[in-house]
Amino acid sequence: MPYNIFNVPKVEGSLKQRLNDFIFSFGHAISSGAGIAFADRDINYALHLQHERIREKAYVMEYEAYDRGVLTDVYAGGEWRDGHYESTMCFTDCGIKRTVIKGGKKLYGDDRKLVFYETLTDVISGTQPENDSYCCPNCGAVTTIGELVSGCQYCGTRYKMNDLFPKITAFYAIDDMSRSEEEMKPIMKRYMITTALVLAVIGIVGNIIKGTYSDISEVIGYIPQIILTLIFSAIMGVFLGYMLFSVSLIFSAFGKAFKTGDMLGTIGSRKKFERKMRARSPEFSFEYFTSKATSLIKTVIFSPDEQDLVYYKGEKTDPRFKDIIDLNYSGALGVVKFEEKNGITTVVTDAFFDILYAKDDRISSMRRVFRTTFTR
């Protein structure tokens, strides 16, 4: 997605910096337990619980976020608002490397190419101190409160302010099929070089079998023929290597499409949910519901005892939940059932997550669907 072909508006200035800062901060929050000043309480609480889960299992989880260069900007997608707040879904590309370590030994590692989505929420009315001038408490430089929340440009000091808007109120990442030119080149070269080497070996070995190079004393006389074989292999390696590379991309796309095929059942959930929910609460949006739903699911999964949570009612969760050390919402939530009775609205959902399980020092990655019932 290197070109903004749909003229999607860009996010600029301090807001863009805050969105990018979050991508490079949430991994540190998981590994250290430190909160993120411009993330809401639900996100910070879930990250804290995840940190505690990893620490109790004596693991170290490292995140390395990096710029892939596919989308050079941050873009604003859908918007929605209620009586007090307005929210915008923003997205950009990134790469994230995850490493799980125990006792100095690497147990797991991956490198995912992603489109990262963040919900940015701001107040509609009221005093907003974002652009108010303030002296950095560390170095004394005059700047704005908003810049201090992201980090002083002179000394890096961050100003923590719980009620400062705009805030990040939700985030998730999905696998990105697109690749930048810099990402494509080394993969394509490997295909071409490997193909050329295979053709060269086949050509030379084939001539040896035929007896063309059997007389070792006269091998020098066959050098021109060997050179021609290598040249032919190099030329064909470029063409065939490129074709194999293209075919691999197609199969990769089909593979990921098959992997996400079970999420097709979520199509239409937004329209069904909003049509019924807005009849009771016109300000309610599917994005708001999804953000809150995924945050609650994460909190329940990472809680030491979910039955201590005031908003959780039900039996003990599956014991395997205690082996989850990382989970990422996959961007799909389906409404299975919507019921209104005696003034109570009940919504049953299927939410899709990519998960890392850790059991007996074995780390496994898989996709799981959590069916959850919400009432209001």
Image (cartoon, rainbow, N blue to C red):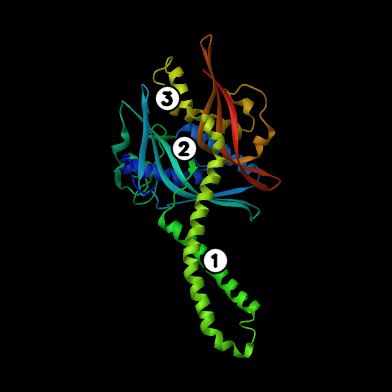
State the CA–CA distance, disc 3 to disc 1.
52 Å
Residue 71 versus residue 67: which sits nearer the camera? 71
Determine crowd level at label 2: few under 14, some 14-19, many 20+ residues with C-alpha closer than 10 A: many
Q: Amino acid at mark 1?
A: Thr
Q: Residue at x 42, y 22 (%)?
A: 284
Pointer 1: what residue?
194
Q: Which mark is residue 285?
A: 3
Q: Position of residue 124 (x, y in %)?
A: 32, 27
Residue 7 versus residue 134: which sits nearer the camera? 7
Q: Position of residue 331 (x, y in %)?
A: 49, 36
Residue 301 versus residue 331: which sits nearer the camera? 331
State the CA–CA distance, disc 2 to disc 3.
16 Å
Indicate which disc, 3 or 1, sits on the residue closer to the N terminus. Answer: 1
Left or right of residue 309, residue 85 in this image: left
Q: Assess whether mark 1 and mark 3 are in contact (beta carbons under 8 angstroms).
A: no
* Kind of element beneath mark 2: strand
Q: Give the number of the mark in front: 2 or 1.
A: 1
Q: Residue at x 31, y 31 (%)?
A: 128
Q: Which mark is residue 171?
A: 2
- Residue 228 versus residue 149 in the image, above or below: below
Determine crowd level at label 3: few under 14, some 14-19, many 20+ residues with C-alpha closer than 10 A: some
Q: Position of residue 223 (x, y in %)?
A: 54, 84
Q: Residue at x 68, y 48 (%)?
A: 362
Q: Residue at x 71, y 46 (%)?
A: 360
Q: Give the number of the mark in front: 2 or 3.
A: 3
